[in-house]
Image: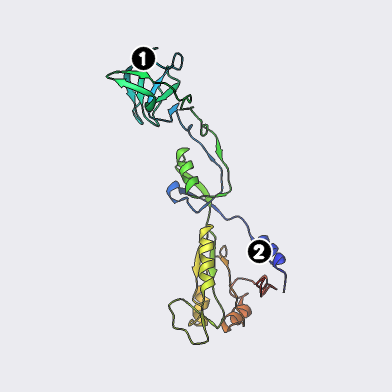
Amino acid sequence: MISVSEALDALFALANPLNIETVPLSDAAGRVLAVSAVAEREQPPFPASAMDGYALNSAGAVTGAIYQVVGESAAGHGYNASVPTGACVRIFTGAPVPEGCDRIIIQEDVERSGDTITLKDNLDPKYYVRAKGFDFACGQTFDAPKLLGPNDVALLAAMNVPQVQVFRKPTVALISTGDELVMPGETSNPDQIIASNTFGLAAMLREIGAEVRVLPSRAITFNRWNKRFIWPRARMLLLRLAAPPSAIMIWLHRRQKNMGFSANFIKLPCAPENR
C-alpha cells in the first residue's frame, strides 16, 4: 500500500506525451494543442467601426456642425474612397472606417435631413474606432500546450488558422471490478448496486480530451477478457477497483504480464473525510 501522493507521482512518471497529429479546426475542440499556432492576419484587418453611425474627420466635429453624406460603409462592403473635409459616410458596426475618417458619431447624436446631418448637443466623446490589429497582430502566437475549448477555436478561426497540431487522444479503459456492482440497465440482485462512479469518471476523462472505453463488469468470460486486452501498447488501462476483490480482478492481477501490462500499485489508504 502506498500513499495518495506516491500514487500520483507514480502515475505522472508513467505519463509521456503522445504522438502529434494534425486535425481540421472543426475537430479541434476538446483536443490538446501540441504546437503553438500563428496568426495569419490581423484582427481586425482594418480600422473598424464599433457602432452604427457616421464616419468623419474629428477635426471640427462640434455641436451644430453640418456634414454631407457621400456614401455608406457596411460589413463586407466598405466605402473605397477618401472622405473629404465636411463630408461623412454612413457606417455600420464592424464596417471598415473610410480613409480620411478617424471618428464615428453614433446615429443617436445626429439629426439627418436628406443627405446632410447636423451634430446634436452633448456629443458622445468616444471615437468608436477599433484600430487595425487591436485584438491581435499578424504573427502573434497562440501558445501550446492548451486544452482547446469553444472560445479557443473561435479565436484560432479569427487568426485564419484552418488546422492545428494536437496530441493524439489517450485511450482509457474503465472497469468496475466489485462483485457488488452491475451496469446501469442490468438486473441486479438485492445485495448489489449500480456502477455509477465509472460513468462519472468516464465523463470527466472525455471532458479533458481522452477517448474512453467502459468495459462490462460482469457476465464475461476470461477468454473474452483476453481478446479485449489485445490493444496497442500505447494505450492506457485504468482499473477502478472495488472491495472485496472480484474473481475478475484476481484473475487480471495474476495474468498481467502475459497480457502486456503491469500494476504499478494495488490500493491506497484513502477514505471520505467525514467517515
Q: Label 2 belongs to which residue?
A: 11
Q: Residues within 10 Å of mark 2 (few under 14, many from 20)?
A: few
Q: Is residue 268 above or below residue 99?
A: below
Q: Which mark is residue 238?
A: none
Specify the amino acid type for callout 2: Leu
Q: Is residue 205 left or right of residue 110?
A: right
Residue lying at 45% horizontally and 17% vertically, measured from the top left: 58
Residue pushed farthest front?
A: 121
The image shows residue 154 at horizontal and vertical percentages of: 46, 43
Q: Residue 157: where, in percent of width, then height? A: 45, 41
Name the front one of labels 2 and 1.
1
Residue denoted by label 1? 66
Tell me the quarter of the image containing the C terminus: bottom right
User: Considering the image in quadrants, where does the N terminus appear?
Assistant: bottom right
Q: Position of residue 22 (x, y in %)?
A: 49, 48
Between 10 and 103, the residue placed more toward the observer is: 103
- Residue name at image x 61 percent, y 75 percent: 256
Who is closer to the viewer here, 18 or 58? Answer: 58
Residue 113 showing in the rendered view: yes
User: Is disc 2 placed on a helix, strand or loop?
Assistant: helix
How many numbered discs sit on the rendered protein?
2
Confirm whether residue 46 shows in the render: no
Q: Residues within 10 Å of mark 1 (few under 14, many from 20)?
A: many
Disc nearer the start of the sequence (2/1): 2
Residue 155 screen position, x and y as percent: 48, 41
Amino acid on which disc 1 is placed = Ile
Above or below for 146 versus 70? below
Given residues 64 and 11, the one toward you in this image is 64
- From this view, report whether residue 210 is shown above or below residue 181: above
Q: Secondary structure at mark 1?
A: strand
The Cα–Cα distance between marks 2 and 1, rounded to whole angstroms, is 72 Å
